[in-house]
Amino acid sequence: NAGVMQNPRHLVRRRGQEARLRCSPMKGHSHVYWYRQLPEEGLKFMVYLQKENIIDESGMPKERFSAEFPKEGPSILRIQQVVRGDSAAYFCASSHRDSNQPQHFGDGTRLSIL
Amino acid sequence: GQQLNQSPQSMFIQEGEDVSMNCTSSSIFNTWLWYKQDPGEGPVLLIALYKAGELTSNGRLTAQFGITRKDSFLNISASIPSDVGIYFCAGPNGQNFVFGPGTRLSVLP
């Protein structure tokens, strides 16, 4: 009964490199959400995707950040040309059927930028 | 957009005490969710509420959907050390959910 799986759990990048964060939703879930969490803060919504579609990306920076959820495979959050301020925990959540169903979270990817 | 407030921001209690925390919104919600986050892990869903006035329990946890539909409450009875963590409320915001800033709970032995 696998839950939401995120990898890697920890990712270290140098400034200017690219970071790719992966998320496999719970079995049967077709809605994926990405959140960002800074230390001692709450969860900030970034993007909501269904298979092959971005539904709401209002919380995602317009530059350097992109997300996809292909027909096959995990959802990917991609950060290009990372900067120190990108250091944070990035959480993925998934839900069943429609967007107002409770979301179930993975254990996150902790991104550190050197 | 929607914003949620949680109170208290943090609390320190003795093991065995009961805990109460709340979440308020400026808008009416039709769903309230309560999550707990342990250090280094993702939030775990504790309780989901779908109707004004609804009272739902999960073990020692009880949550209520406020009758004004602008607030929700979470109570923990007879706290134990593993209750330590951050408790988040969440409510619908368009096609996703907005999360409160969290209540940080510390339990002293």
Image (cartoon, helix red, strand yellow):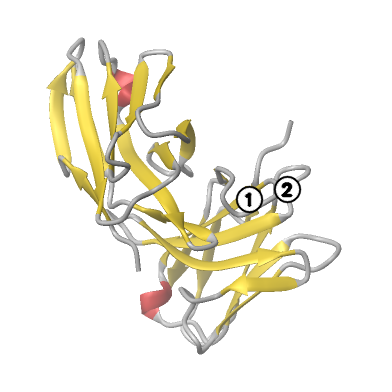
Q: Classify B64 as above or below A38.
A: above
> Reading the chain from its start, which is encountered first: label 2 or label 1?
2
Q: Where does the image place residue A68, in percent across and percent down from the top left?
A: 70, 72
Picture residue at 32% right of the left edge, 42% below the top = B69
Residue A67 point in image, percent of width and height = 64, 74
Q: Which residue is mark 2?
A: A29
Residue A16: % across, % down: 51, 87
| Residue A114 in view of the camera | no
- Quadrant, the C terminus of chain B: top left
Q: Nearer the viewer, residue A93 or A102?
A: A102
Measure the alpha-carbon separation of dots 2 and 1: 6 Å
Q: Chain of mark 1?
A: A
Type of amino acid under label 1: Ser
Q: Is residue A42 visible?
A: yes
| Name of the residue lying farthest toward the right | A72
Query: Decide: marks 2, 1 in contact (CB < 8 A)?
Result: yes
Residue plotted at (54% across, 46% down): A107
Q: Is residue A70 above or below residue A18?
A: above
At 34% across and 51% down in the image, what residue appears? B28
Q: Which residue is mark 1?
A: A94
- Where residue B54 sits, quadrant-wise, is top left
Note whether B61 is above or below B86 in the view shown: above
Query: What is the tally of numbered marks visible in this picture?
Result: 2
Which of these two is toward me, B92 or A105?
A: B92
Q: Residue at x 47, y 82 (%)?
A: A61
Q: Amino acid at mark 2?
A: His
SS for callout 2: loop
- Quarter of the picture containing the N terminus of chain B is bottom left
Report the side of A97 relative to B12 (left or right). Answer: right
Label 2 is found on which chain of the structure?
A
Residue A16 relative to residue B108: left or right: right
Q: Residues within 10 Å of mark 1 (few under 14, many from 20)?
A: many
